[in-house]
Image (cartoon, helix red, strand yellow):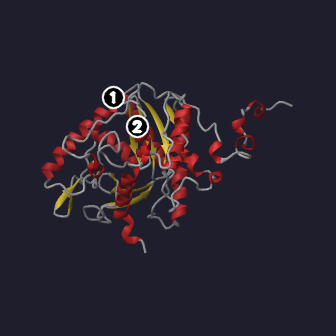
């Protein structure tokens, strides 16, 4: 008797894909919709997006760095000042709402009412409060650098032929006045928290989908040829502002993001999804690719994810180096420290 399952390939069946194989030998993770070869690539997102950008730069792809470090800043200080982490110096873009507002700000179509936060005798940018190790000396300096930054972001969005975005969180802190999505809770790395002005929002799947659809439409209006490459961060929440236990809250957040990524993939032929989340988190991986804290992804895990990506893209003569700790990802430790320091600015005081 004929039925649809009879025409499915082996990768569609658990028994033909997983049992009897070492987890590292499980394959057929991904079939690309488009190629990265010979195309200008930009990245943004949560901390995990940094790994993708580093791999692309380190293996010779045409990676956009629209806001490079100026001469005189030593390489070991680049991360401290937010250089080289992404294609521009916007820091971590954790949520769909942040991403949408970043594009609108770059186009001059959205200007948050909270333009500067006082901090440690100076001021910081509420939309990237930890981008430098010390506050700016004045609002004039902050605004001058922000104008230059947003011009470079607009250039990046305009030039990108592939835009890579890693969905990281659903939990967001929003301005009650104009809906600005802050990367951190006000009052942690600058400013003063005011419950009348600042609201917590755990974005729903409907809200994330709406944000992303608006972003996609607006980006394609600016840059009609750009294609979008989505991933979901496999890094669990460090802490939650909900009443749920942190692992339960993390499961909700990742489930929403993964569902929306799938919907966007199904809805748009120019959007691709790469399963870095699944490669790291599947039960048969037994947590092998996590560090001892069961949260951070190890360099070995990142290397395996990128090897899978490069292999699916046809090899192209590129590979992630095979070493006890892949050198391509050694720098990630400093960047992960910066990510964790940023998050601890929000959550550290609440930890026992």
Name the secondary structure under disc 2.
helix
* Residue 159: numbered disc: 1
Q: Residue at x 62, y 52 (%)?
A: 285
> Is residue 94 in view from this perspective?
no
Quadrant location of the N terminus in the rendered image: top right
In this view of the protein, which residue sits in the foreground, 116 or 342? Answer: 342
Left or right side of 223 for 142: left
Question: Mark 2 and mark 1: span between their CA atoms?
Answer: 20 Å
Q: Where is residue 159 drawn, in percent x and y?
A: 33, 29
Q: Do the residues labelled 2 and 1 touch (CB within 8 Å)?
A: no
Q: Where is residue 176 drawn, in percent x and y?
A: 32, 57
Q: Which of marks 2 and 1 is nearer the N terminus?
A: 2
In this view of the protein, which residue sits in the foreground, 253 or 218? Answer: 253
Q: In the displayed orientation, state which residue is furthest to the bottom.
A: 352
Image: 93 above or below 171:
above
Q: Which residue is drawn at 73% across and 47% down?
A: 19
Q: Where is residue 303 drawn, in percent x and y?
A: 50, 44
Q: In the displayed orientation, state which residue is furthest to the right.
A: 1
Quadrant location of the C terminus in the rendered image: bottom left
Name the secondary structure under disc 1.
helix
Q: Residues within 10 Å of mark 1 (few under 14, many from 20)?
A: many
Left or right side of 128 for 9: right
């Amino acid at each position: 008797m004929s039925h649809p399952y009879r025409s499915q390939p082996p990768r569609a069946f658990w028994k033909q894909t997983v049992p009897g194989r070492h987890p590292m030998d499980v394959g057929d993770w991904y079939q690309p919709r488009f190629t990265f070869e010979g195309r200008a690539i930009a990245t943004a997102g949560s901390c995990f997006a940094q790994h993708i950008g580093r791999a692309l730069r380190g293996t010779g792809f045409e990676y956009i760095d629209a806001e490079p470090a100026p001469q005189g800043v030593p390489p070991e200080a680049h991360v401290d000042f937010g250089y080289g982490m992404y294609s521009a110096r916007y820091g971590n873009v954790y949520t769909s709402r942040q991403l949408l507002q970043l594009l609108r700000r770059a186009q001059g179509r959205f200007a948050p009412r909270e333009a500067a936060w006082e901090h440690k005798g100076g001021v910081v940018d509420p939309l990237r409060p930890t981008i430098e190790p010390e506050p700016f000396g004045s609002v004039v300096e902050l605004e001058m650098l922000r104008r230059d930054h947003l011009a470079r972001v607009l250039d990046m969005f305009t030039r990108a032929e592939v835009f890579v975005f890693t969905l990281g969180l659903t939990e967001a802190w929003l301005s009650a006045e104009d809906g600005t999505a802050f990367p951190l809770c006000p009052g942690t790395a600058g400013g003063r928290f005011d419950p009348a002005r600042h609201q917590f929002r755990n974005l729903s799947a409907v809200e994330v989908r709406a944000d992303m659809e608006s972003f996609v439409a607006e980006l394609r209006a600016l840059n009609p040829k750009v294609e979008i490459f989505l991933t979901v961060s496999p890094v669990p929440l460090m802490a939650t502002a909900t009443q749920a236990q942190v692992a339960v809250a993390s499961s909700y957040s990742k489930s929403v993001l993964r569902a929306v990524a799938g919907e966007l993939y199904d809805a748009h032929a120019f959007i691709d999804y790469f399963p870095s989340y699944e490669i790291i988190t599947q039960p048969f991986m037994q947590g092998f690719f996590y560090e001892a804290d069961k949260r951070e992804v190890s360099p070995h895990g990142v290397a395996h994810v990128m090897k899978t990506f490069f292999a699916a893209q046809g090899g192209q003569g590129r590979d992630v180096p095979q070493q006890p700790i892949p050198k391509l990802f050694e720098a990630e430790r400093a960047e992960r420290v910066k990510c964790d320091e940023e998050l601890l600015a929000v959550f550290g005081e609440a930890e026992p």
